[in-house]
Each structure stands twice: as C-alpha cells, then as structure tokens.
Amino acid sequence: MAGARFRELFAQWMFIAPAAAYLLLFFGYPIAKNIVMSFQHYTVTTFYTGAAPFVGLQNYAEILSSDPFPKALLTTVLFTAGSIFGQFVIGLAFALFFRRSFPLSRVLRSLLLLPWLLPLVASGTTWRWMLDADSGVVNDVLRGLHVLPAGVPWLTGTSQALVSVTLVNVWIGIPFNTTILYGGLQDVPTQLYEAAQLDGAGPVTTFRHITWPLLRPVVSVLLVLDVVYTVKVLDTILVVTGGGPANATETIATQSYELSFQQFEFGRGAAMSNVLVVISLVFALVHLRANRRAQNA
Amino acid sequence: MKRVPNRGRPSTIVGIVLLALMLFPVYWMVNASLQPTGSTLRGGWFPSHPDFSGYVTALRDQGPGLVTSLVVALGSVTLSLGLAAPAAYALARFPVRGTDLVLFGILVTQMVPSIVVANALYSAYNDLGLLNSYLGLILADSTAGVPFAIIIMRAFMQGIPREITEAARVDGAGRLRVLRSVVLPMSVNALITAGLFTFLFAWSDLLFALTLTTTETVRPVTVGIYQYIGAQTNQWNAVMATAVLASVPAAVLLVVAQRHVAAGATSGSGR
C-alpha cells in the first residue's frame, strides 16, 4: 500500500520535475552563483587562470563607496517612481475609458498592446531618432508650434535625458497597466454603478466610492509588479541613451551591466546586481506586510 | 448594458485620436524606413515617394540575424511549453505537497533581474561551451517564457471541470494520457497565448543576446539593430527598416491570435 502511494506521488512529481529542474538551474543557480561571485575577485583573468580569490566584502565596499553609486541609486529611484506614476495614471485613464464599450473599442484596445509587444530595440531606436535634438520630429513639432523655438536637448541634456528615458518607459508600460486594470474593472458588478446612478452620484463620486475601493486589490498587486519590473529595466536605457550623457541615466542595472560586461569586473558586477535584488526584495516584503496590516485592520 | 445611442460615436473618435497618439512612434518607424538613404535624419511626414532601398540593405545585412532570431524564438516556445504544460497541469490538479513552494519559486523568478542570470550564465556557459550557441540562447531566453507559461496555463487548467479529467481516469487513461488527449486539446487558447508571449519574449531579447554571444556566429537581429545605433550610421532608413522587420512578428501575432489571446487571458484573469 505504501509502495503504491509512493509510486503515485512519484508519478505526480514527474510532471513538475522538468520545469522545477529548469527553474533551479536558470534561476536558483544564478542567484547562488551571483552571491558567491560578489565575494570574489572575479575578473576576466579568472577565465584563464581559474583563480577567483575570496575578498570578503571588498566588492560591496568598493561599489557602495564609489562616486557614481549614490547618483545611480537616485536615478533608479527617480526613473522607477516617474515611470510607475505615468504608466499607472495613464493606464487607469485608458482602462476607465475602454470600460464604456463603444464601436471599435475592442480593436482599439488590442492595438494599444503594440508598444508592449514590439521588440524594445525597435521602438527604442525609433524613440531615439524621434527625440534627436536637431532633426527629431518631437523638436520639429515644438518648433513648428512656436512653443519652444530652441527645441529641447532630449537626449543630450543631463536632466532632460532622464525625463526622456522615463517617458519612453512610460510609453512601453501603459499597455500592461491598462490590461491589468481593465481586467480588474470588469470584475466590478455593474449593479453597483446602476445603483449609484439612481442615487444621483456623479462620475467623480462613483469613482471614489465604488470603482477605487473595489479596484484596490488589483491596484496593489499591479504596483508591486510595476516596481519589481521597473527597477530592473536595463535595455530601454541601453538603447535610448546608453546611460549617458555624462552618466545622467546610469541606474543600478546599467552599472551592473557595465561592470560585468564592459569592464569584465564580474565580482563587482555581481555585487551591484545583488543590490538590485535586495531593493526589489525589501520593497516586496514591506509591501506584503503593509498589505497584511491593512487587511487585518 | 444599455447605452445612450449617441454616446458611442464621440467615444470612438476620442479613442481613435488617443490611439493615433500612442501609436505615432510605430507610424514614424514605418515612415522613416521608407525614406531615401542619407546621413540626415530629417524626412517628410509622409513617405510620398516610398523608397525601399532601406529594406534591401536591411535584408542583406540583417537577413541572417532575422533567421537566427526565428530559430531561437521557436526553440524557446518549444522548450517553454514542453516544460510548462505538464507542470501547469500538475500544479492545477494534483494535491502534491510542495505545490505552494513551486508557486512561490515562480513568483520569485519575476523579481530576478536578467542581468543576474546573464552574469552567472556567462561563466557557466564559458565552461560548458554554450557561448555563441543556439541552445545556450534558447535556454537563457526561456527564463522569461517558462514562468509566464506556467502561470497562464495553470490558471486556465484550473477552470477545466474536474469531472472530465476524472472520467478519463476512470476509463483507464494514465495521467500523461489525460494531459495529452483531454487537457491540452481543451487548453488550446491558453497554449496559444503562452506560446505567443514566449515567442515574443525570446524574439525581443537583447540582454542575453548581447552578453552570451561574443562572435557573429549566432547573432539575433536585436543585436544587429543595437550595433547599428552604436556605429554612427548614415543609413537610417536601413536601421528603421530592420526595426520594422523585427516588429513584424509582434504585429502579425497580435492580429492572427487576437481571438485566442482574448479567450486565454480572460480565463486567466478570472481566477
């Protein structure tokens, strides 16, 4: 009897085993390996000599005290906060707009997915070209409308460049936010809206007292996903500004990439990427706890 | 829901205007790809004299890259669905202890930056000889596809009535047989949705292609475009033509699979 039960259990696990093994090899191993590497002097010579001496916390001490670190941390925070604010607000507006079904609304809603589905390199290159200070179409329009005859140095000004990559990332993130929020809105019972209408509630009151409270659980999950996905954004920045000008758009993620794959300082690159993981983790845990407290209250 | 008859049309117009604004960069990409060769970035608002020389250059230079991307993306779809389908079924149906742990692990994967994976894989691949290989890229690119496919398919499979799978079991079908002949045919929408996104994840990947290839042998089109930008090119129309070609799968799949995706995604969000 015990044997049959064991065989049954074994058979069931065989369904999960291949995927579990893959996840362990391609997530578990890299996480562990990164932690180990971050305590080693692991550089390009390691590949020839095989020697990666243990250096304790030296990598962390170096990156945390390095000049660009505080700025990269600040840039990461600004980029993340700005991106999420823009994506969420515009995504919510789109979701509310599409909830009133009108002719063509389905087609338009699926077309809205395009910015999310296009390869980032393709759309990022296009943006780079559109934002060119001299001949980009954005400045052409601004000049043509006589709003800003001088144009804006979108990619060459140090503060403007951060705004630009953030805007591009907002553009990419709107479809995801719209889709999730639209799904959440579908679950709000229509009777509630009908009742509110009978009571003479205006759109603002209805939103504040019905839509928003009922959407809260979805919003809460979405914001965590947004943060977790945004702090690790790397390719958008690589394509649109390459971290420049003058390191103005360097984030923790781009720094990690440059340390590992341009300077071949794999140990320090690993330490930098671990800082990124810790930020994500801390945020998720804080959020979970706050959520639990809100539920208990 | 009843609608006031005249309210529909203004919304449609507003919707079209908003969409036009959102999709302007897509239009601009196509427009730019049809401009004649030149070092200036300036072009007209419309490709009044469409010039296809950009596409000729793009296909000549990036044709192999497009094929590489296709091979890698299809490989990633096969691997991801092959690993995810049985796992999703088991996680949806079997009361195995440890299910929660696996699900938690899948959530954790969403927090791991690709750079962490790339950093560790580079040295592992170097030892295993997987740098500059199709297999290496397929395995790495599937890090986005596998967790995603499990989540989507599990949500869908939970909605399949238990009676159906149990009836098949009573008739003597093994678990694998139930999966293959009952569950998978019923999950076509979820399979297509998962496969579609997995394809696009791998097709659009830049970071793994950039870090895990060092030579020209296996070079996806995304790296080709990235290198174009680095090398102050005077053939912007070719760059943009390559970008358009790289965007075609996204557009085609969006149109072709729209119905399946809508069905697959709504059943997923209904959980």
Image (tube, coloured by chain):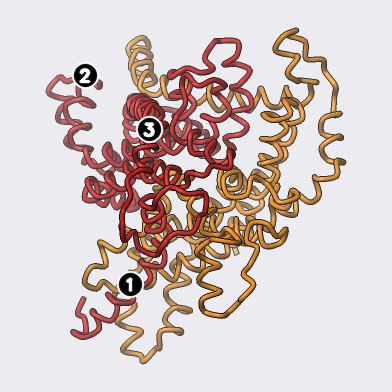
Chain colours: A orange, B red
Residue at 21% x, 19% y: name it: B174
Name the quadrant of the N terminus of chain A: top left
User: Looking at this view, is A1 or B60 the one in front?
Assistant: B60
Subunit of mark 3? Answer: B
Residue pictured at 41% horizontal, 20% vertical: A18
B176 to the left or right of A140? left
Question: Do we see residue B196 in this rendering?
Answer: yes
Q: CA distance from mark 1 to mark 3?
A: 40 Å
Residue that carries the numbered disc 2 in the rendered image? B174
Q: CA gap, disc 3 to disc 2? A: 17 Å
Q: Which residue is mark 3?
A: B91
Report helix, strand or loop for mark 2: loop
Q: Position of residue B6 (x, y in %)?
A: 21, 86
In the rendered structure, are the residues bearing label 1 and label 3 in contact, judged by CB atoms less than 8 Å apart?
A: no
As displayed, is residue A126 above or below residue A96?
above
Circle 1 residue: B15
Relative to B123, say whether B256 is above or below.
below
Q: Chain of mark 1?
A: B
Relative to the observer, which residue lies in front, B99 or B151?
A: B151
**Tag count in the figure?**
3
Q: Is residue B64 rendered to the left or right of residue A31?
A: left
Image quadrant where residue B195 sits: top left
**Place of residue A37 in the rendered image (x, y in percent of width and height, measured from the top left):** 73, 23
Residue farthest to the bottom, as pictured:
A200
How dense is the environment of label 3, judged by Cα within 10 Å: few (below 14), some, or many (20 and up)?
many
Please provide percent x and percent y for residue B167: 15, 30
